[in-house]
Image: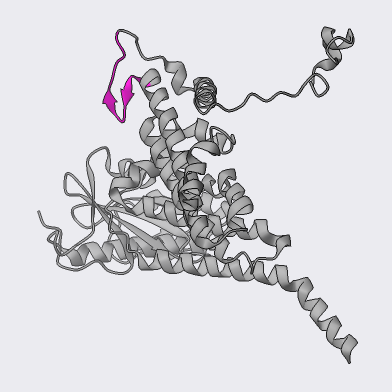
Amino acid sequence: MRYLKVFMNGIIKENPVLVMLLGTCPTLAVTTTAANGLGMGIATMFALVFSNVVISLLKSVIPRQVRLPCYIVIVAGFVTFISFMLQIIPWLYWLYESLGLFLPLIAVNCIIFERAEAFASKNNPFISLIDGLGMGTGFTLALFIMGTAREILGAGSWMGYEISIGEIPPMMIFGLPAGGFFMYGIIIAAVGKLTKKPVRTIGCENCPSRATCKNFTAGEADK
Amino acid sequence: MNEEKKAVSLKFEQFKPAIVLSVIIALVGFVLIVCVGLIPDTSGIITEKLMVKCAELMGEGEYELVTDWEEAGYKIAKPREVEKLIVKDDKSVAFEIITSGFNKDALDILVAMNKDGSVRGVAVAAISESPDQSKKVSAAEFLDRFKGKSGEIVIVGRSPESDGEVEGITSATISSKAIAEAVNIAIETYAEMGVPN
């Protein structure tokens, strides 16, 4: 049960992209098509799972002062291996070309470091593996959903197949960065609504705009 | 006595982070080298960069990478010096050859061949010599000197007097020689492999 909870944690409650808002750079950059999003997600998941296990195994060896350099080296090693494999496997080569610069950049993906720092360095290897799988699946799903939405709306296709929604022509803007932000916001809002994330109430005391707020200066809101 | 011991252990504690980090870097590097070395590249993929150079030398067309030479009808198996053999749809061939200049395995050279066994063109696909030398030997002005050559090529420091001589680039002699070495390998391999018609 504990394992299932850790796994589901990464997909819904602490989804790295949609709830924790980590790894925004690859999320916005590569999700122009559903297939790219899926590929990026799986490549990242691979690096995440293996680095989680290795870091968890080495947690008692790595001194605190140099833990980040150690994590970077380990993650970069796995990412180098992935990009090497993508180059020599014929049916994956398209992914190597379409991800381009963002493939080596997985090495500095903050999702991987967050999990290494917050989870793998404190837990045993097996549960770290489950955590990596859960987080990776959450990341992949988020990227896939975003890629799907952007590809259908922006290019009028899905996974390379032509798809049209009624008479609406493809809207180019969804393939561009601005449309990416737009879609990202919509999906975050939708997921927040669906998972019933409680609305954060900060009260007038902590409100950042209280200095200019009429209600507060009038002294009505404090009571 | 006791104090001395304490001083030594303190010293080790100070160096421990650096040592652990170095060991991890060395280990990761070693594992990667082993992995990359053990997995052979039999994919038959021509990278985009190489494709551009092929098109420059032999024109637009369909290119194919030959991984098993004997199966493809050539007389010899792939020699170790040749990295890749690329065949165009009109049966003309080009070799990708990696040679060492000033740095080890620094030059990735593409040599296209004419049907009669002479050099059709030379291109530098990748080079990791120092920038100045890289620029000089990658210039078309120098690479064109190999066009039409056949037989053993020697780099000389003056204007060429015989057919087998090519004038090198002053201040980039080693890199020039590395390119000539690649061209020589290509000419020799082409003569040995017997291109099927």
Query: Could you say which quadrant of the image residue A210 lies in?
Result: top right
* Extreme residue toward the bottom, this view: B1
Left or right of A123: which side holds A145?
Answer: left
What number of labels is visible?
A: 0
Residue visible at 49% across and 46% down?
A: A5
Which color scheme is applied? one colour
Residue B151 drawn at (x, y percent): 28, 64
Q: Nearer the viewer, residue A27 or A81?
A: A27
Is residue B103 visible to us here?
yes
Tell me if residue B160 is in the magenta stretch: no
Stretch of the chain drawn in magenta:
A155-166
Residue visible at 42% across and 30% down?
A: A145
Residue visible at 85% across and 83% down?
A: B6
Residue A68 drawn at (x, y percent): 66, 56
Residue A159 drawn at (x, y percent): 31, 31
Q: Nearer the viewer, residue B193 or A180?
A: A180
Is residue B146 visible to us here?
no
Q: Is residue A110 above or below residue A223?
A: below
Residue A36 drawn at (x, y percent): 39, 36
Q: Is residue B116 above or below residue A204?
A: below
Left or right of B126: which side holds B20?
Answer: right
Q: Nearer the viewer, residue B158 or A186?
A: A186
* Extreme residue toward the left, this view: B197
Residue visible at 73% across and 61% down?
A: A65
Q: Is residue A25 above or below residue B153?
A: above
Quadrant of the snapshot with the C terminus of chain A: top right
Tell me if residue A158 is in the magenta stretch: yes
